[in-house]
Amino acid sequence: MTKKPFYKQSLALFFTAILGVTTLGGWVSVQAQANREAPQTTPPKFTNFKDADKLPLSQSGKPYKPSTLNQSEKPTGGVRGIPDGIDDRVPMLSREYPWSTIGRVQGTTADAKSYHCTGTLIFDNIVLTNSHCVIDPETHQLSKQILFLPNVINGNVQNKRDIALVEQVIYGTDFKGDRITNQVNDWAILKINKPLGRKYG
């Protein structure tokens, strides 16, 4: 049996080590990216409105506009987008305050279907929306996962790192009451895991 020269053995060992480190590094990088992009699947904690006073909000009651954002009176940013007379809705296309506070509530139902609604930041980590956006009015099932995407325009969020996970839901109705009560109390407050109000208002 012939023995390989020492330098060839060292070279083979060196390349094996580099390949191993590169493979491990790539795997760690993929895992870290997957963990960063895939939100938790833990359902939010749901609380009936009778206990809503247990959510402390310390604020002055005045709107907050981040100094980095411009302010605009027009949600379209000056562009109508829809021909007059056909549809009187106005598209929200502005990245400026106060329109920046409006975002998308994106949920997953008990039977794994996805949906979306509108929500508005009313505090650093609090979003106001409707109960029917977190509880199915027909089946009374609670959403399994809820995300808040700030300042969504044409289905796109400006910064994907700002997508927040809803940790807690305080709701006004579970739709088990009479029709009038359900309509009057069709509101929900969502506590998110990021202080997006500091950035978006």
Image (cartoon, helix red, strand yellow):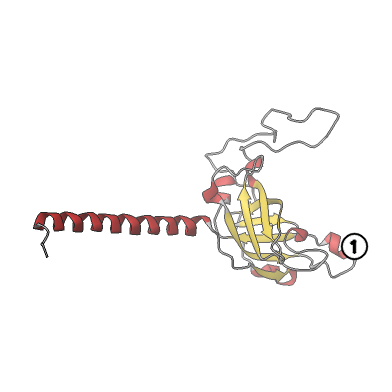
For this rendering, which residue is in front, 121 or 56? 121
Residue plotted at (71% across, 63% down): 109
Q: Nearer the viewer, residue 149 or 197?
A: 149
* Image position of 30 (left or right of 162): left
| Residue at image mark 1 | 180
The vertical placement of 139 against 93, above or below, is below
Camera sees residue 98: no
The reply to whether residue 30 is in sight is: yes
Rendered location of residue 61, percent (x, y): 65, 53
Residue plotted at (75% across, 64% down): 135
Picture quadrant where residue 130 is located: bottom right
Q: Residues within 10 Å of mark 1 (few under 14, many from 20)?
A: few
Asked whether 82 or 35 is in front, the reply is: 35
Report x, y in % for residue 164. 57, 55
- Percent coordinates x, y for residue 192 in the rendering: 60, 59
Q: Quadrant of the image for the N terminus?
A: bottom left
Q: Amino acid type of disc 1?
A: Ile
Residue 143 placed where, x, y %? 70, 64
Give the left or right position of residue 27, taking residue 72 as reference.
left
Q: Quadrant of residue 186?
A: bottom right
Q: Secondary structure at mark 1?
A: helix
